Each structure stands twice: as structure tokens, then as C-alpha cells.
Image (spheres, rainbow, N blue to C red):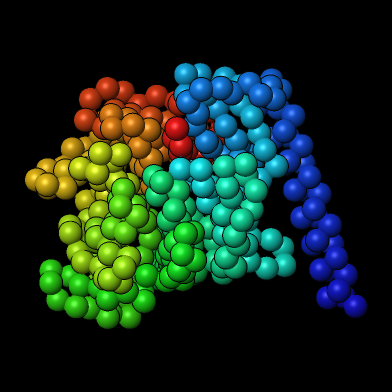
Amino acid sequence: MRTRAKLLVTAAVAVLLGGVVVGHAVLSGPSGAAPAAGAVSGPRLVVLSNGLLSTVSRSDPAGPREVTDQRCDRAYSAGGTTACLRPVGAFGAGGLAVLDASLREVRTVPLTGFPNRARVSAGGRMVAWTLFVDGHSYAANGFSTSAGVLDTRTGALVTSLEEFTSSVDGVVTAAADRNFWGVTFAADDNRFYATMSTGGHRYLVEGDFAARTLRSVADGVECPSLSPDGTRIAYKAAVGGDPRRGWRLSVRDLATGAVTPLAETRSVDDQPAWLDDRTVAYGLQRGDGVNDVWSVPADGTGTPSVLVPEANSPAAPD
């Protein structure tokens, strides 16, 4: 009976807290003003506001936002598809919800772990996710992640990239310490990039979904994001190779290997998102624990600036 009572109390608290968060997100925007229904028109940005899927105008990203009732821990939208990693509840794991352009749930994938990254290919066909299975930080020792991919057209589901044949410098590896995270897709809906951690290295790997292979491209690359023109990777790199010192955002030219550190010098623990071929966006947590979406030029010039206050998981679906 004691156990049952504790469970009931836990459930009640979870419901109460959930209600408080939802009420705040729907009734007030970042400055306390109520979001205006139907206020967003033209090119959009999709973000999470207090965990709720929301839309802001590209021309006025700090202005009114449309807030939905779709609750996600991480999300990404492209090509009429939204990947929503549901929060882990009081009584079990969350999972992946695939939403269509009308935000109707068209597919769910049960998952075990803590939501961390989500991506959708530009055409909306391919969906990827990353979960923490053990640990909650890439800087921690002994963390474990799981990254999977779903082809929404064929229904093909890869629950873990560990199923693929991996090679480092041309040598096949099946090391037990392999971890994968931060998938990003090319325009052909077959090729993709991700991070593979093994043997103390964090490699940028290029994947072939049809062939079920992964090959190393570069070392010291985490959470890659392929530019819209397919020529560059934005990513985070551990300062001095030590994640405990934080991460620096950079852009790597895939053809030449040239690396351009971006003007954001603070530690960014996020998978950057390209707003266009010239601009990168990312989430950054304030000292009070609130996240803002920032942007910075992709060529290393300029100054970082707040793009969407009190938000995270940015995507530019238009």
C-alpha cells in the first residue's frame, strides 16, 4: 500500500507540474505577452517554447509565436515532417512521434532513454534521433547513447546505428565502446553524417543508409549539421579535445577539410541548425537555466545574437 500511495502521489505531482508548464506556455510568451493565434505568416522558424512546439516568423523571431499543444523534449521540422521526442514520464519512457504538416501524429516509435537530439531530412522523408541510455552529458565518463533512423516512406526502421558496419581509416571496427549521436541528412535521403565515439575519439562518420555502412571522415567532430548546399558541416568540438572544458562551434568544409571557428566563443552543447547557407542557430542556456536560441554567421565573422528568446530546438522548415 505504501508503494501504491507513493506512485499515486508521484502521478498527481507530475500532472500538476505538467498543467502549470502548459498553462504558462500557452498564456504567455517570453515577455509575458499572450501569443496571438494566426500571427505567424510567411517564412517560419519552429522552436520549442517551454517544451511546446511553437512557430515564429523568420522576419520577427522575437515577436508573437503560435504555441501548440504538442509537447516535446527535442524537436525538428523539415519538409512537412516534424520529429518530436516525447518527454520521459513518471511511469516510463517517452518515444518518437512523427507529425505531418498539420501536426497530426502519423507514426510513433517506442524508445527507451532520455531525449537528446532530433533531425529530419530536408524533404521530410528521413527522421533520426539520439537518446542518452546511460548518463546525461557528453562530458561525463561512461555515458552511453543510442541513435536511430526511420524512413517514413518505406517504414524501414534502424533502432541503433550499431547495426551498421563501421570503419575507421578504412579498417572495420566492431568495438564494444562505440556510441553514436547527432545524425544529419544529405539531400538524397540516403547519405547522412553522425558522430561515432570509440577508443577515446569522436569521429565524424559518413553513413550510407541503403548499404548500412559508416566510415570515418574526421576526428574531433560532434553533433554535425550539414549545410543546405551540402558542402559544409557545422559542429561542436571539445576545447583542447577535453569535453569537460566545454565545446566550440566550428564549420568544416567537406571538400578541403578547412575548419572555420565561429564567432560564438561560449561553450555550446547543442547540435547546430542551419537557417540558410550563411547562418547557424543553436540553443544556449542562461545562468538561470532558461534557454534562448542564438544565431551567428557561418563564415566566422559577425557577433552572436539572440534569435528567439526562451526557446530551443530551432529549425527553419521554409
Residue furthest right as drawn: 1
Q: Quadrant of residue 249?
A: top left
Residue at 46 percent of width and 37 percent of height: 317
**Left/right of residue 33 with respect to residue 149 in the rendered view:** right
Residue at 49 percent of width and 59 percent of height: 152
**Left/right of residue 136 with respect to residue 275 in the rendered view:** right
Residue 234, compared with residue 300, is above or below; it is below
Q: Quadrant of residue 32?
A: top right
**Left/right of residue 112 with respect to residue 256 in the rendered view:** right
Tag count in the figure? 0
Estimate the x, y position of residue 295 in percent, counting from the top left: 38, 30
Estimate the x, y position of residue 97 in percent, counting from the top left: 59, 56
Residue at 35 percent of width and 37 percent of height: 274
Q: Nearer the viewer, residue 257 or 268?
A: 257
**Residue 238 seen in the figure:** no
Residue at 36 percent of width and 74 percent of height: 162
**Left/right of residue 78 with respect to residue 31 in the rendered view:** left
Q: Nearer the viewer, residue 280 or 191?
A: 191
| Image quarter (top left, top right, bottom left or bottom right) of the C terminus | top left
Estimate the x, y position of residue 189 in percent, counting from the top left: 34, 55
Residue 204, compared with residue 314, is above or below; it is below
Residue furthest left as drawn: 256
Q: Nearer the viewer, residue 206 or 190?
A: 190
Estimate the x, y position of residue 308 in percent, counting from the top left: 50, 28
